[in-house]
Amino acid sequence: MRTPSLSLSQGHVFAMRPCQCQMPTSKGVVAAPLLQRRPVARCTAFRGQPNKQQQRPAPCPCRSSTGGESSNSSDSKVAEKSSGKIATTLAGLDALLGVQEEKQDAEDHKASDEAKSSDKLTVDVSPDVVKSIAQADLGRRNASNGKGKDSKDVEKQLSDQMTRIVDRAKQLASQDTEQGTYKWGKVTEQNLGKDFETLLGMLRPEESVNKDDIKILKEQIFGPNVFWVTETRATDDILDGGIVVRGNLRAPRDQVLETVIKGVKQTFGDKYQVFLVPDPDSEEADPKGGPRVAFQVLPNIVAQPKPIVRWQYAAATVLFGLTLLSATQLGLLANVSKLPKETIEWLARPENYDPDRTPPGLEGFDPVPFLLSSLPITASVMATQFVHELGHRMVAFRKKIKLGPSLFIPNSQIGTFGAVTQFKSLVKNNTDMFDVSFAGPAAAAATSLALFVVGLAWSTGGDIPKEALVPVPTQLFQGSLLLGSIANTVLGESAMRNANVLIHPLLIGGWCGLVATALNSLPVGSLDGGKMTQAAYGQSTLTITSFFTYVGLGLGFLGSSLALPFGLYVLICQRTTEKYVQDKITPAAGGRQTALAVLIIASILILLPMLPSGTDAAAVNNGTFL
């Protein structure tokens, strides 16, 4: 006999077999069908009308209390036993079919919907944030093109656009996809993406590289015979409006860069600037030698250094005056022995400090000779820094590189830490950056060394009167391994055994100049030494040398008592590397790497202190660095 079957909700089939119990019907007594599961599926015998949601299948008629009873007690026991088996089987079937899990999922989904409906999405645009963004964007645009623009208009445009984005987000978050609004939600999501692109377009420079210009760049400027373009895409910083052009060189990279720069200049004028950078997606070497390269095309508005503003000139003037005062203070402190003895003893006791009281011994004291005695040291310190900055500017002028005003950094121990002098125009290549950066320390080192040698010679004899010499504690020479060793050798052991030694003021000026030059020659950040390291050895090498320089300064190995203030100065003012170089790949050559290595080694030897012995340890750690 053919076995009857029922269709399933998932297209499977359950086979049926006759049941042991019987049920009365209008046509007599027939066997009630029992489901015997073959594949894992759901039966279509639902309670009520079927719908798209899965429901628990109707129980077998054998489980109904109204079903037919057996004619005797034996059949009744069999039916009860069979009914228990059926219940166990159906319970296992429910577990296999996931009926209980579906019920639990439905309950969780319902609770989640209730929670979503009870929570209101509240998103607001902070006026302070909008105002800050508007002011920053306006300042960047006005600083670059010099055109004035109403800050309130820019702020209103950005505020309206950001409010529109927030409204879209609220609509998207509150839409109910289960109630036929899925299509409407997709439209809202697309509109939200367009609004975001509009906001980014408002923040991007007005001269961003557009599609038509990209086509001209690929077809007319790069071309198959110059640089075979394989990909053009936006730069990592989406707000700079530039693109990265990847491909393969068809000639030496310096020739290709020169051709591309010339082509962009002829085609677009000053609209764009071109940079040669490492390929961001390739670490393989280029077949023509060196690393694989890419080109970065940026709008001139973001590619150029920030222009000089008036406050920088005012700040340079103020800092120069403070540096002059610190150098004068250094000279006066070195000649403090020229004050009356009772005045020195009174000043040596802090408890005597009283700004309204005149120190003893100064009655009738003529301060003019004392002030004039500070001139040799003050003039030496300032002359060294003047020569340093002059060296930078002479080479920069020859290479047509514009520099900003020199912002001198005063220091009470050596007069000054040097000056912050920024590039205010693009630097063509690493060789030019090296030459400009190297010229300052080289000129300052030569001047300081001459002062140091002359001062050392005049300290050991000659026709120099004793009154022109300055007494200095011998322990202070422990502050520099190189300079201290030279001074100890020239002055002699007999002079260095005394508590104080008489030296010429030029020796102090030369010493301070050499220390300041050594500090600025350290390979870290955007110091002169950092720029030279970046130009000669690359960015990765500068990262390594910067780390060890920070460690040396942090532990006090470099510069002794000067390490902490100078390290803070670098972190605040000079920690970022130089980025306004068009050819970032080709290193400076022609013996420049060797010259830099010699300069860095000499700087480290100057800044490393001598190993103190006995009472010398206190002198090195008391905060004074000669």
Image (spheres, rainbow, N blue to C red):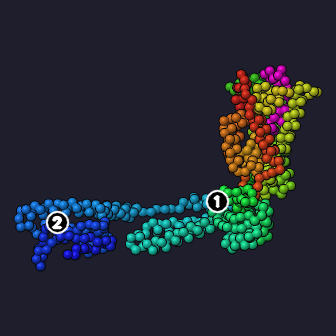
Q: What kind of residue is marked 1?
A: Asp
Closest to the observer: 493 or 402? 493
Spot occupied by residue 303 in the image (x, y as percentages of width and height): 72, 61
Which quadrant of the rendered structure holds the C terminus?
top right
Does residue 245 appear left or right of residue 424 in this picture? left
Report the magenta residues as a range. 491-514
Position of 91 with respect to 378 (left or right) is left
Rendered location of residue 445, percent (x, y)? 83, 41
Three-letter residue code for mark 2: Arg
Instruction: Give the main secondary structure of the magenta stretch.
Output: helix
* Percent coordinates x, y for residue 136 in the rendering: 65, 59
* x and y, in percent, of residue 458 in the image: 90, 29
Q: Nearer the viewer, residue 480 or 233?
A: 233
Residue annotated with mark 2: 63
Residue placed farthest to the right in the image? 463
The residue to which callout 1 is attached is 281
**Image quadrant containing the N terminus:** bottom left
What's the residue at 9%, 63% (across, down)? Answer: 76
Check disc 1 and report its element: helix, strand or loop: loop
Foreground of the two, 7 or 543: 7
